[in-house]
Image (spheres, rainbow, N blue to C red):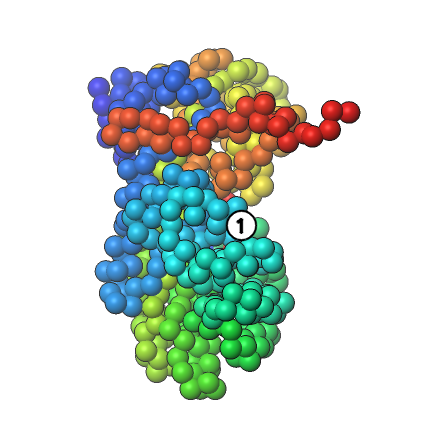
């Protein structure tokens, strides 16, 4: 018997179904995936990834036509050679924030003219490489960097396109560590304090730099469009000032990423067709208000493209009933991964859903906590969940929506090898990032004593 994915809940990716009591991806049941690839493993719904990336590409085009800029996939959410290759096939751009992310983009065949370099502390090497290969743009984040990029451009005999990262002073409603555009942050230049204007003036003195426009990124896991609408208005007011002083209009506007996804059944993943028309209206209204021509509009979704497309499959090792303060029992279910493959619960108090993946259970649920195998109390994947009380060692557990900032933020804490990523499409599964081995971990140790 097979059930449609939606009946499983909004946090499961498109090609997940329920076959004979098992969670299945593209028709392959969880038990078979575990047998072939081991646990813990990230399983990626490749068709869902491709269709989400394509929906952003087509949505931007539909909304802005000729004025559609790039969808820059924020590769910090998750990248590897295969993913970068899909991005280049789909024809969107990529946002890289480090030399490592740049290397993955190039390894995947992304055209440098579709790469945007970010970062609040780019190294000279990162800047030099980006300038020499001819990236689409470097997003300037400090006054020092203006000189560094100009020096590199001079050295390579190029004029480097740049954007300025602005801080529009918006409190987007999300966790403090992932909210990035209020005033007291390390990123960008504040519009309100005058820092942003000082950056414009400095760039204007350097012929090696071509100021193409302004950028902002207001935070992550954002629902609703109000914060984006305010950001668009403030950025365009700023570019109108530029036009008034310098007599020409800046041709590009990049509104960053941050579009939320469903982690729990009562959340709804933002779709490009939901947000882009509203953002389009706000941008057009602001352009009319400040008498500006419509610039090209770019966006940088990361989580929204990859987040919904993966689930993590774990195996239960132990189950323990612990009497807690109020006298009740909490079931501690320990799996073979933990904070090394999902740091988000420990870092941000993120919430996830989990289910037994290889069988159904009609047992009553019990107050439970899903934990990992690391040597600390904070090693929690799900703090509170009502979970079938008959869970036993050997059960497989799937946590959906782990595609963004899961594998990409994985660590080797406790010398645990990081899990592989397996892409599944059309009923076929293949490893795109292999599992680390103990030999990989020891390979970095150079001294024998
Ligand atoms: N553009 C810029 C300049 C960014 O800094 C980010 C994310 C993005 C785009 C993509 O944002 P997204 O669309 O994925 O929300 N580790 C945190 C999220 C940190 C986001 C950092 N910047 C988490 O796990 O929630």
The residue closer to the viewer here, 437 or 359, is 437
| Quarter of the rendering containing residue 2 | top left
Q: Residue at x 48, y 52 (%)?
A: 96
Residue 239 image position (x, y, % from top left):
44, 77
Is residue 55 toward the left or the right of residue 124 in the image? left
On the question of residue 120 being in view, the answer is: yes
Q: How many marks?
A: 1
Q: Is the CB atom of the residue marked by disc 1 within 8 angstroms of ligand 1's nearest atom?
A: no
> Secondary structure beneath disc 1?
helix
- Whether 291 is drawn above or below 96: the answer is below
Which residue carries the number 1 mark?
A: 99
Residue 326 image position (x, y, % from top left):
62, 26
Residue 17 image position (x, y, % from top left):
28, 27
| Quarter of the rendering containing residue 11 | top left
Residue 185 image position (x, y, % from top left):
60, 60
On the question of residue 285 being in view, the answer is: no
The residue closer to the viewer here, 120 or 224, is 120
Q: Residue at x 50, y 40 (%)?
A: 408
**What residue occupies the far right of the structure in this picture?**
449
Dot 1, crowdedness within 10 Å: few (<14), some or many (≥20)?
A: some
- Whether 17 is drawn above or below 190: the answer is above
Is residue 281 toward the left or the right of residue 211 in the image? left
Q: Residue at x 38, y 38 (%)?
A: 82
Quadrant of the snapshot with the N terminus: top left
| Quarter of the rendering containing residue 50 | top left
Is residue 189 toward the left or the right of residue 291 in the image? right
Q: Residue at x 77, y 25 (%)?
A: 449
- Whether 387 is drawn above or below 351: the answer is above
């Amino acid at each position: 018997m097979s059930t449609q994915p939606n009946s499983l809940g909004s946090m499961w990716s498109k090609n997940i179904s329920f076959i004979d009591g098992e969670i299945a991806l593209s028709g392959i049941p969880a038990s078979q995936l575990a047998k072939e690839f081991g646990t813990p493993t990230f399983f990626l719904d490749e068709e869902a990834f491709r269709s989400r990336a394509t929906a952003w590409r087509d949505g931007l085009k539909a909304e802005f036509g000729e004025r559609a800029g790039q969808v820059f996939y924020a590769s910090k959410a998750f990248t590897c050679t295969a993913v970068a290759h899909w991005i280049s096939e789909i024809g969107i751009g990529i946002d890289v924030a480090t030399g490592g992310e740049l290397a993955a983009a190039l390894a995947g065949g992304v055209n440098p003219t579709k790469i945007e370099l970010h970062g609040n502390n780019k190294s000279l090497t990162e800047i030099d490489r980006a300038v020499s290969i001819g990236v689409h743009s470097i997003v300037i984040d400090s006054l020092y960097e203006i000189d560094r990029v100009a020096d590199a451009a001079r050295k390579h005999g190029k004029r480097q396109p740049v954007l300025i990262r602005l801080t529009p002073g918006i409190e987007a409603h999300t966790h403090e560590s992932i909210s990035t555009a209020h005033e007291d942050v390390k990123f960008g230049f504040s519009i309100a304090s005058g820092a942003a204007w000082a950056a414009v003036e400095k760039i204007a003195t350097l012929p090696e730099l071509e100021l193409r426009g302004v950028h902002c990124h207001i935070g992550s896991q954002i629902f609703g469009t109000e914060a984006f609408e305010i950001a668009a208005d403030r950025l365009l007011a700023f570019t109108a000032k530029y036009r008034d002083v310098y007599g020409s209009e800046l041709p590009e506007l990049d509104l960053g990423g941050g579009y939320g996804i469903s982690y729990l059944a009562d959340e709804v993943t933002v779709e490009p067709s939901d947000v882009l028309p509203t953002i389009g209206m706000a941008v057009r209204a602001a352009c009319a208000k400040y008498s500006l021509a419509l610039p090209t509009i770019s966006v940088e979704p990361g989580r929204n493209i990859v987040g919904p497309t993966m689930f993590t499959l774990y195996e239960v090792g132990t189950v323990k009933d612990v009497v807690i303060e109020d006298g009740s029992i909490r079931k501690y279910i320990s799996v073979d991964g933990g904070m090394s493959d999902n740091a988000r619960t420990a870092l941000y108090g993120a919430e996830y859903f989990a289910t037994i993946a290889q069988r159904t259970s009609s047992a009553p649920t019990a107050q439970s906590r899903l934990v990992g195998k690391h040597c600390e109390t904070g090693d929690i994947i799900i703090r509170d969940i009502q979970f079938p009380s008959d869970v036993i060692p050997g059960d497989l557990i799937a946590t959906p929506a782990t595609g963004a900032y899961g594998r990409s933020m994985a660590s080797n804490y406790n010398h645990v090898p990081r899990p592989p990523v397996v892409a599944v499409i059309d009923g076929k599964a293949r490893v795109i990032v292999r599992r680390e081995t103990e030999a990989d971990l020891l390979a970095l140790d150079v001294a024998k004593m």
